[in-house]
Image: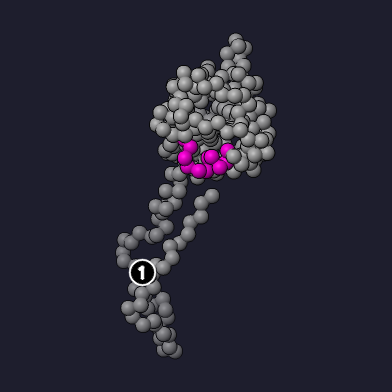
Amino acid sequence: MFTLVAPEGDQGFFSTAEPPLVATADSPPLARMHPPPPTGATPATAGPSAALANVLRDPRIWRRSAVAAAATIDAQPTGIAGLDARLPGGGWPRGALSEILIEQDGLGECSLVLPALAALTRARRRVALVAPPYIPYAPALAGAGIDLAQVVHIDADAGDTHWTAEQCLRAGCCGAVLNWLPRADYRQLRRLQLAAETGGAIGFVFRPLAAASEASPAALRLRITMAADGAPRIDILKCRGRLGDHAQAMRLRA
């Protein structure tokens, strides 16, 4: 939410160079004491202000109009060309939450994020794994190009998982934070989304497929299911910044 506040201490509006006018009984009406505006002057309300235009360009502002200019979204490439082509900014949105809904474990949900994690760690950005359901296999991570020196594995109890992930996202020292949430409500997800915005990190949240019917503040929601041929299928359920017909779900091969 944005609140436009008028600047304080604007001395140009109240001038102290001359004494104030005092109306007397024989004074002309106040409207006659002020000269009319110069011919050809443009009213102040002729168009949107620069401040409002800046607000509307913010990627967090969603505009339904298909003719609206696409906002510039800071994103980290996913490493999958077909998916990058369908995501505004060409990848995982930075400073936002990306929710990955999985039908079952082992459908390639971790492989989906590995290229981005490798790029972040090569840039010496920290990656935090908060309460993963399985012990991370270091040789596989290193084989994917991830610098293990930039990876932090945090064990947290079920009641502390949300708080731990929120602190990592908000700190500003992590390039990405991965969190596994079997159960989460909208308020908890909203706090994670705001923390990601504050810290400028990429927040990955892995949740069961049943959560697809629930409302979510995440900027991006992907669903991974098993296709008829046995290959995983990715559906884009929600993607902030998409306009017009492109808001329909896209299907890709992982």
Relative to residue 86, is residue 16 drawn left or right? left
Mark 1, Cα crowd under 10 Å, few <14 / some 14-19 / many 20+, is few
**How many numbered marks, from 0 up?**
1
- Which is more toward the observer, 60 or 185? 185
Q: Work out which residue is located at the far front of the displayed protein and give it.
A: 149
Determine which quarter of the picture holds residue 230.
Answer: top right
Q: Residue at x 48, y 59 (%)?
A: 5
Q: Amino acid at mark 1?
A: Gly
Which structural element holds mark 1? loop
Q: Position of residue 58 (x, y in %)?
A: 45, 44
**Magenta extent:** 165-175
Q: Measured from the top left, where is residue 226 in percent x and y? A: 62, 16
Where does the image place residue 69, in percent across and percent down from the top left? Answer: 42, 39
Q: Residue at x 38, y 60 (%)?
A: 43
Dot 1 corresponds to which residue?
12
Visible residue check, residue 240 = no
**Residue, x 58% and y 17% (percent of image)?**
232
